[in-house]
Image (cartoon, rainbow, N blue to C red):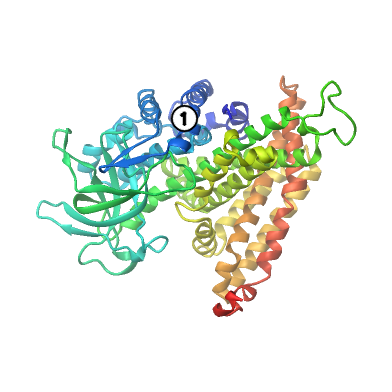
């Protein structure tokens, strides 16, 4: 399988739907359309020529641990050096520490490309960027001065160390301890599991952000602090010193992303430094986790795009049977399978889910940018609320779509999709982890209900629906589509009210409705975005665009989504309205029968 970045669709989303140049002007970063397009073209070349060729071998070769040292797959180290030398590592970093300060709306497109080209390769740099975000916002001036520049440049890498064998989602159970030292540092002792990039041979140093408890910490999540623990200690002059008491105890044996080292990390009285305030570590880590959850959503999108490209190429080439309506390629022994309606169904489902998620990714990225860089406090606060509402949707729905689109890719290939030679089964295996890490998708759904919907009694969701309804009212080119989307938005509002009432009556409803409500919300939100895309495509066609085929495809895709994909929301609505009693009525012992 080969990968080429979908630059035309990315430009449509960024420039024609969301005016990224105007967004950059508002942020004051000096980026214009020409610069953005140039960066994306170079990014497409880098991902296609440098990263994508690594994907197959990284799955077959994997990572290896010997004497505490991890070796990454052949080619990873050289590709990572180019990644750093060409400035891709510093793309989003703060300017004060050598970064380029690109907004999320632009960088998200490049990150999607990386996910499509090789998810395993992207894992290493992704967590480093999250480490930069957390340290920049919560670290002391001394910690920033000592560590940030090298993290921003990519010279050093970063990790996020939360999970322990007995403490996954429930971080209140974590046992790693931090003992204060006379010099102001701490000694950390404990073990962490599932640490992506915990040990690797790409960088000379790895900066671990570790959750641990102080001796006098209160119980539960209110007693968790965040610490910076380097693999190698850093001297006062910035040079690397001796190895810290941090080691990789084992590599996990995984079903996918085998080129990404997933480590058991042991901290044996390792030297560390407090990040932020004592016992406020979870709040600091959530800064990193929100960024990571957005990035994991992009992983789902990247996998979906790669699977769609593979499926489309195969459907155009594979000859099998004749079209139901008669031969389409009479000069060949059979017609390409793309002529068959069911193959079209799968391809259009792949296409509309992938492109719909790309639109939502750009919209969410804009909120993340405004959350930190808008000129006024009310604008920043509004963007913070909107981003918080969208993050669980992006993480959960995108990764569910990635798995579905990869599975459809396997189906398109038939038996060839099930064997290794064609590469599609790797995408399906690689995508599966995205539904699990950085908070399983069930946890994202609970977050949407408990913290977001119940947290403000539906106020932010109402504001989002109001905004979308205004846009629907302005969609004059497609009255029938607009009416359908408008009805769904009203139904969404009423459904949210029903969910709120049910959850207030019975706390069990929170868990019972969460997954279906998240899916329903995402399908309807994508419908509103597809309507916007159709409206823009119609305007371009009316203006005599030189690319009529592209815009006609947008109109046809919007029509397919609204008629064949959006009805899925009905099933989710019916399911969540069925109540929690059918889930909780059966005694635990009866599950065995």
Which quadrant of the figure has residue 361? top right
Residue 454 in view here: yes
Q: Position of residue 559 (x, y in %)?
A: 77, 41
Q: Is residue 544 left or right of residue 576?
A: right
Q: Would residue 400 appear left or right of 314 to someone viewing this image?
A: left
Eyeballing the image, is 538 above or below 299? above
**Can I make out residue 26 in this image?**
no
Q: Residue furthest right?
A: 326
Image height of 147 relative to 521, above or below: above
Q: Position of residue 375 (x, y in %)?
A: 43, 40
How far across and down, in percent of the image, does residue 359 sit?
60, 39
Front in this rendered view, residue 505 or 473: 505
Q: Residues within 10 Å of mark 1 (few under 14, many from 20)?
A: many
Q: Is residue 581 above or below residue 266?
A: below
- Residue for badge 1: 54
Percent position of residue 10, x then y: 59, 31
Numbered label tally? 1
Tell me: 52 left or right of 287.
right
| Residue nearest the viewer, comparing 355 with 331 | 331
């Amino acid at each position: 399988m080969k990968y080429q970045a979908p630059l035309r669709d990315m430009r449509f989303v960024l420039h024609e739907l969301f005016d990224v140049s105007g967004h950059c002007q508002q942020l004051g970063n000096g980026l214009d359309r020409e610069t953005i397009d140039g960066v994306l073209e170079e990014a497409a070349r880098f991902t296609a020529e440098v990263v994508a060729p690594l994907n197959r071998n990284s799955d077959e070769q994997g990572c290896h641990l010997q004497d505490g040292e991890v070796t990454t797959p052949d080619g990873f180290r050289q590709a990572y050096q180019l990644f750093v030398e060409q400035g891709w590592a510093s793309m989003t970093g703060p300017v004060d520490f050598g970064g380029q300060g690109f907004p999320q709306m632009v960088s998200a497109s490049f990150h999607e490309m990386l996910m499509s080209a090789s998810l395993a390769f992207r894992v290493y740099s992704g967590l480093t960027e999250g480490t930069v975000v957390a340290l920049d916002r919560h670290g002391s001036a001394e910690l920033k001065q000592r560590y940030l520049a090298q993290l921003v440049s990519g010279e050093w890498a970063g990790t996020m160390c939360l999970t322990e064998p007995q403490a996954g989602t429930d971080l209140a159970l974590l046992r790693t301890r931090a003992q204060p030292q006379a010099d102001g540092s701490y000694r950390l002792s404990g073990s962490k599991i599932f640490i992506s990039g915990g040990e690797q041979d790409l960088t000379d140093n790895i900066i671990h952000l570790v959750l641990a408890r102080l001796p006098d910490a209160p119980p539960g999540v209110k007693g968790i602090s965040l610490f910076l623990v380097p693999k190698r200690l850093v001297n006062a002059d910035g040079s690397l010193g001796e190895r810290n008491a941090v080691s990789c105890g084992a590599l996990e044996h995984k079903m996918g992303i085998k080129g990404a080292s997933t480590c058991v990390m042991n901290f044996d009285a390792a030297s560390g430094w407090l990040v932020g305030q004592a016992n406020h570590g979870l709040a600091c880590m959530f800064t990193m986790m929100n960024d990571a959850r957005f990035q994991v959503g992009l992983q789902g999108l990247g996998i979906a795009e790669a699977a769609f490209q593979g499926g489309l190429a195969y459907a155009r080439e594979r000859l099998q049977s004749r079209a139901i309506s008669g031969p389409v390629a009479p000069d060949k022994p059979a017609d390409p399978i793309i002529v068959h309606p069911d193959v079209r169904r799968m391809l259009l489902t792949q296409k509309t889910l992938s492109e719909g998620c790309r639109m939502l990714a750009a919209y969410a990225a804009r909120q993340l940018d405004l959350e930190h860089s808008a000129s006024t406090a009310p604008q920043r606060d509004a963007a913070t609320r909107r981003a918080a509402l969208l993050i669980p949707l992006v993480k959960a729905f995108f990764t569910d779509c990635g798995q579905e689109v990869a599975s459809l890719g396997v189906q398109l290939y038939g038996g060839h999709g099930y064997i290794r030679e064609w590469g599609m089964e790797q995408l399906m295996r690689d995508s599966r982890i995205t539904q699990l890490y950085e908070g399983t998708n069930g946890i994202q759904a609970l977050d949407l209900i408990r913290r977001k919907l119940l947290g403000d009694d539906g106020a932010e969701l109402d504001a989002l629906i109001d905004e979308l309804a205004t846009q629907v009212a302005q969609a004059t080119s497609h009255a029938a589509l607009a009416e359908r989307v408008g009805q769904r938005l009203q139904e969404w509002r009423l459904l949210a009210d029903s969910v709120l009432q049910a959850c207030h009556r019975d706390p069990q409803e929170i868990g019972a409705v969460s997954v279906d409500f998240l899916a329903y919300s995402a399908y309807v939100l994508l419908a509103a975005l597809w309507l916007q895309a159709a409206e823009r495509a119609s305007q371009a066609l009316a203006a005599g665009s030189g690319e009529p085929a592209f815009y006609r495809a947008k109109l046809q895709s919007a029509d397919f989504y609204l008629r064949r994909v959006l009805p899925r929301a009905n099933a989710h609505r019916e399911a969540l309205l069925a109540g929690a009693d059918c889930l909780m009525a059966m005694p635990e012992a009866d599950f065995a029968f």
